[in-house]
Image (tube, rainbow, N blue to C red):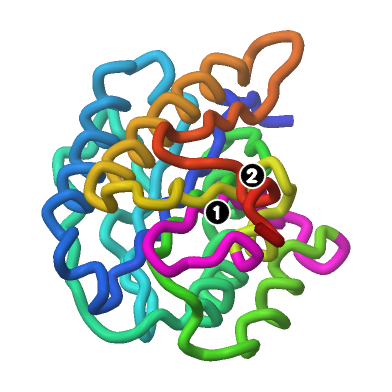
Amino acid sequence: MAEIKGVLLPAYVLADESGSMGPYREELSEGLVSLCEGLRAEPMVAAKLRLAVLGFSDDVQVRLAVADMRAETSLPEVVIRGTTRYRAVFDDLRQRIPTDVQWLRGQGYKVHRPVVFFLSDGQPTDGDAWRRSHALLVDRSRTPTAPNIIACGIGSAEARTMLEVATRPEFAFVAVPGADIGRAISEFFHSLTASLVSSGQALNSANPQLVVNRPDQFTMAIDEVGL
């Protein structure tokens, strides 16, 4: 049996690039840069992570392929375009994640269940079309590499929708009413970086687990439903 090189956690950042995000393009770009630089500043943690950044609107476009941030020198660039099609996200991940996991295993790594950080500022413009794709993605009997999904909504994204996207109720958040959207985006990336650092540190512990920090300026979506 080949020797295992180590244990990896694949992490996918899904950033809403629809037209309504236009006023916040700078905050979105700066947040992605801060994420990459934050992981580079933690090489022992970065060694256990593989990061991908995907921008979504009418389709999904790769801004950073699955990368070892200790060696990656490029930075993801945001392109504002189109509408907010959630189905495009889940169709893409259903194909992408199993392929990436197989590739990482082929490199000699043990791979933990992937994690997806989903950020959107609006309701899906494709109605209910995304629900079947999402259900197939998170069904572990059909998709053995089904990811954990952390969903964060800002702007007009509704708490109930974030609860449906997230794989656990405690993984769904929405910006507090009246929150500055630009600041909320910054806090999302700050929390995302902290969550990945903590999760990476836990991988080789006696109790490896996914650590999810609630971003400042956000509340748990379940507390907002029905209010």
The residue indicated by pointer 1 is: 151
Q: Which mark is residue 92?
A: none
Q: Could you tell me residue 201's position as x and y percent? A: 53, 15
CB atoms at circles 1 and 2 under 8 Å apart? yes
Which residue corresponds to the image point at 46% horizontal and 87% vertical from the top-left?
125
Q: Quadrant of residue 184?
A: top left
Q: Could you tell me residue 199's position as x and y percent? A: 56, 24
Q: Is residue 8 left or right of residue 27?
A: right
Q: Looking at the figure, which quarter contains the C terminus?
A: bottom right
Distance between mark 1 and mark 2 Cα atoms = 6 Å
Amino acid type, label 1 = Ala
How busy is the neighbourhood of tag 2: few (under 14 within 10 Å), some, or many (20 plus)? many
Question: SS at mark 1?
Answer: strand
Which residue corresponds to the image point at 57% horizontal and 90% vertical from the top-left?
127
Q: Looking at the figure, which quarter contains the N terminus?
A: top right
Q: Which mark is residue 171?
A: 2
Q: Is residue 221 left or right of residue 152?
A: right
Residue 101 vs residue 34, the one in the foreground = 34
Q: Residue furthest top?
A: 206
Tag 2 or tag 1, which sits nearer the N-term? 1
How busy is the neighbourhood of tag 1: few (under 14 within 10 Å), some, or many (20 plus)? many
